[in-house]
Amino acid sequence: MSMIPERKNAELNVFMRMGLPPSSYMFQTYEGKPCLLMAARTNAHNVYTLHIELDQFPNSVPKVFVRKMLRTYYGDFMDDCSANMHTLTSEHGWTRICHYGYESWTPNVSLYKIYVKCRLWLEAYEAHLQTGKPLDTWLTHQA
């Protein structure tokens, strides 16, 4: 299942209104599932590719991955579920970000809001790389 055209147009309008350049995102299919690829540039000018699965969006929380396997400050792969690091079990060989609690999810959440939360996660991740402190230091949990 993919987004209905009206929802996709609404999401694109939000992207445009918020100033996201069209070159920073792309809707495509990966392994038979619709997804959105987004470039996310941190304050340190590092660029990460976010992979947002859209097969159940907007009815349930979409899976979001950084399209590479990230490592912690200590050199460990970020491939497991970790509450204090805000990650879920990886798939595709990529780090999976915990960005939204299931109880907090509504179909009204926009892809742009997911993008913003993932950008905040990336900023916390880069702070972790500098300090060794868990992402919990900067991020809170949702139900």
Image (cartoon, grey):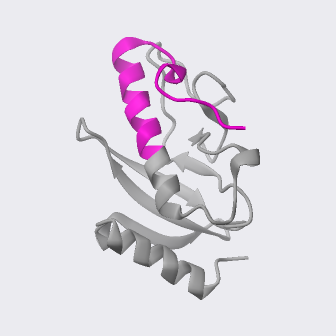
Task: Name the residue nearer the viewer: 74 or 111.
Answer: 111
> Is 129 a magenta residue?
yes
Query: x%, y% of residue 112?
Result: 46, 61
Which image quarter: residue 39? bottom left
Give the residues drawn in magenta, as a range.
118-143
25 up-or-down from 88: above or below? below
Image point (67%, 67%), residue name: 58
Quadrant in the rendering for residue 96: top right
Write the residue at 68% across / 65% down: 107
- Asked if residue 69 lies left or right of residue 15, the reply is right
The C terminus sits in image quarter: top right
Tell me the residue at 55%/25% (across/down).
77
Q: Position of residue 86 (x, y in %)?
A: 60, 31
Q: Is residue 109 magenta?
A: no
Tell me if 87 is positioned left or right of 46 in this view: right
Nearer the observer, 71 or 63? 63
Relative to residue 93, is residue 40 drawn left or right?
Answer: left
Measured as percent of width and height from the top left, residue 4 is found at: 64, 84
- 28, above or below 120, in the image: below
Quadrant of image for the N terminus: bottom right
Q: How many numbered marks, from 0 up?
A: 0
